[in-house]
Image: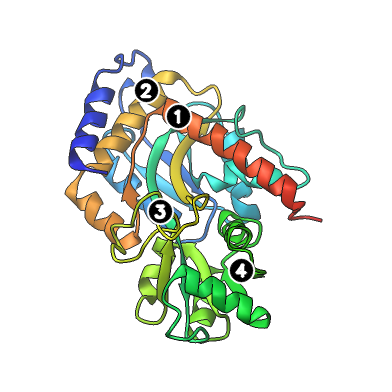
Amino acid sequence: MQRRDLLKALTATAMLPAANSSLAAPVDQAKMLVGYVPGTATDGLARLLGERMRGDYANNFVVENRAGASGQLALGVVKSAPPDGKTILVSPIMTLVVVPHTFSKVSFDPFKDLVPIGNSVTTDFVLVVGPAVPESVKTLQHFAAWCKANPAKSTYATGATGTKVHFSGVRFAQSAGFNFTHAGYTSNSTALTDTASGNVPAYIGSVSTVLPFLDRVRVIGVMGARRSRFLPEVPTFVESGYKDMVIDEAISLYLPARTPQDAVQRMHAAMVKALSTPEAARTLTTLGLEATPSSQAEMAAKIKTEYEQWGRFVKELGFKQDS
């Protein structure tokens, strides 16, 4: 996000009604729940915001990792917490918009159990290839042609099954007209290591996961609406002719349903302020994340749109994580 856009967001939050409840002053301690292990982009964002929001929203933040079930464990803790503004979910939107469709039964309703604060950051998805793919393959069109000519080798790795990155590969293959076998790993680092070692031809994941491997893999396509500022020389899928391949991941903050609106407003203001600092910008760069704060209404609309889009896709695919 450009600096002027951050300043606009700060101005907007400054115009919100002043809080009159006990939450007008910073709470003593707030807990941030992360559904993924330490070292992931979501975990890094939580720790950054916990540090930069200290004193504005809470005097102290504790980050607790509850990894498992595609983020559902952490979400469940927040869903069941008192709506006092002291228990916060830091989560990629994927948990809310994809997981309800890939599991036969989930214990949460993304529209009834949580309140979105507004988006925090975004990371684009990318397709990379390793040494198993010839150096002559430099574009997405080249790669699609190589996959068609080598169907036994047409495989891509991801760090998880039943996720946006998994389905991104399916959508690309459908658009380009070739078969693309998915190899689901239990971690991005293992999937990338196998790609970089030539054990798997390709990998799909976020920019944040790929940056440490840039000396060992080749990025040939970005799924964002525009080129990534981290990889400005790499064309987007849209530029390459795949018009329906705009897929990214928004990582955001959520509170339990029925949390007072003044707490939501105060958290939004603290979040935007935290993301606007030079220190935050430097940390986000190392994480491969881009600050893209949005309003609560904009985030709610994004959740609804993506929930419907991925619901249709998963239904047509006939995929179930637990079948």
Residue picked out by circle 4: 186
Drawn side of residue 88 relative to residue 320, left or right: left
Left or right, 9 with respect to 321, comes to left
Residue type, numbered disc 3: Thr
Residue 191 visible at all: no
The residue shown at (34%, 13%) is: 20
Specify which label sits upstream in the sequence, 2 or 1: 2
Around disc 3, counting alpha carbons within 10 Å, would you say few (fewer than 14), some (14 to 19), or many (20 or more)?
A: many
Q: Quick check: 264 left or right of 110?
A: left
Quarter holding residue 145: bottom right
Say few, some or many: other residues with alpha carbon within 10 Å of mark 4 (under 14 / 14 to 19 / 20 or more). few
In the image, what residue occupies the spot 26% across and 41% down? 274
For marks 3 and 2, the one nearer the N-term is: 2
Q: Secondary structure at mark 3?
A: strand
Marks 4/3: CA distance? 20 Å
Residue 12's spot in the image, x, y percent? 26, 23
Which residue matches tag 1? 85
Q: Amino acid at mark 1?
A: Gly
Task: Indicate which disc residue 23 carries.
Answer: 2
